[in-house]
Amino acid sequence: MLYNMSSRSPLVGFVFLIIVCVLVALTGLVAAQKDPVRPELTVPLVPEPSGAATDIQDDDSSRPATMQLNPAACGGSPYSATDETTLNNAIACVNAAGAGTFTIDISANITLTGHTTAIDTADADEIIIDGNDNTVDGDSKGLVFEVKGGSIVSFKDITITKGSGDSYGGGIAVAGEDTVVTITDSTLSHNEAPFGGDGGGGGLFVDYASKAVVENSKISDNKAQFGGGIWVLREAELTITNSTVSNNKGNSSTYSPNVGGGLLVTLMGTASVDNSTFSGNEVNFGGGIYALESGSEVTITNSTISANSVNYGGLGGGVVVAYGSKMMIENSTVTGNTADGGVGGGIFEVDAELAITNSTISDNSAREGAGIGQSYGTVTVTNTIVALQASGGDDCTATGSIASGGYNIESSTSCGFTGIGDQQIVTDTLKLQPLADNGGDTLTMALDSGSVAID
């Protein structure tokens, strides 16, 4: 029999209405708790640096007043640099030399008392700075090397350390169209860009349509609020090959935020990473790599992203791809990354475009989405293992859905892999081995014999 409200007192009707409202509210609360990735899970934007492309440093502001540059006594290439004065004189000489290829031979360890003279010549065909296994120590007195004005410079066999930029960059800052820097068999370590404002790129700062190539090198233990290791922005291009980007951090111990521990790519910058390792980097968002804004693109191939982390409940322990940016991950391993109290231990995508192919995402940790956290945007996964995360329950957490290109494996059903050749709830039969040296250029996670992932 239908309940007849008219046959009861107004007080009973009022109580009934209150009960209905409470039930509706509880239903909404439960639904909200079940929603794994909420719209408020956003990542921070990064300010565009102020200043002109040719204005990274004031060439005289932090160079000792007693230092005398003497281009008239240049002689010819190769120029020898044995101390701070002769290094600055050599740079002044190549700036004034005109066309040709010039070499600066650093034949001793050098400690600076201020930033060096900017390398600023579009006339030279190439300037080679050969460190001969020596170190240039900035002693926290300024940016170590600044390259601009269309200069083409190759650094090789050199360690650049303890640089402390006045504005951008700590170790090397590169800016300007047609400016190209190649770093080979070298180390950029313990450099720092200034905290606050728009300082960034602790080890390497690549700006304004310039290009940087890093080969067989290490970018490690640098600090910056934006891009602890490297910051690429404003249509600049970066290529990293056979290199390691490790243990770079933000330069604040509090929620700042610090973003892009190993690499930050913004404002239509592009980066290509191949046969390289990002490990042990730590910030608030995007522990290993952070790509941001439309026009910014990152390609990662044959590489390993491991043991990176974000703190203060941040997002994307290994990688963040956000707000119109694009990222492609292929033949790579994402493992051991952590979003402590946050989402996306391995990867976090928000309102961007991400494609993952022939890769392994395993043993990552987060409060939610230990493998992949997705908040709108497009994520497509093909022929990839997303399984056996260290903690955080589900392999994936998504608002909307993660598209399958087929032949994926997950150890739950959270990724929604139901396409051709997909396998779900695969655990012991996967036989995935820990990260180890399996004979390639980077550490990888091998499959034991009899694994269901082996064709």
Image (cartoon, rainbow, N blue to C red):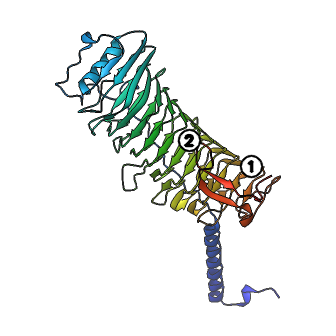
Quarter the N terminus occupies = bottom right
Q: Residue furthest left?
A: 66
Asked where in the image residue 92 lies, by quadrant, the reply is top left
Look at the picture and state if 272 lies above or below 93: below
Image spot of residue 428 (x, y percent)? 72, 66
Look at the picture and state if 154 lies above or below 199: above
Mark 2, residue position: 276
Mark 1, residue position: 383
Would residue 333 appear left or right of 47 to someone viewing this image?
right
Look at the picture and state if 95 lies above or below 229: above
Would residue 225 appear left or right of 308 to someone viewing this image?
left
Residue sitting at 77 percent across and 54 percent down?
454
Q: Residue flagged by tag 1: what amino acid is it?
A: Asn
Would residue 61 appear left or right of 316 to someone viewing this image?
left
Mark 2 or 1: the one toward you: 2
- Among the two numbered marks 2 and 1 on one chain, the one whose residue lies closer to the N terminus: 2
Structural crowding at the residue carrying mark 1, measured as other residues with C-alpha within 10 Å and reported as few (<14), some (14–19) or many (≥20)? many
Image spot of residue 145 (x, y percent)? 35, 29
Q: Are marks 2 and 1 in contact (CB under 8 Å)?
A: no
Q: Is residue 337 visible?
A: yes
Image spot of residue 279 (x, y percent)? 51, 49
Secondary structure at numbered mark 2: loop
Secondary structure at numbered mark 1: loop
Image spot of residue 347 (x, y percent)? 59, 52
Q: Is residue 425 visible?
A: no
Q: Residue furthest bottom?
A: 8
Q: Residue flagged by tag 2: what amino acid is it?
A: Ser
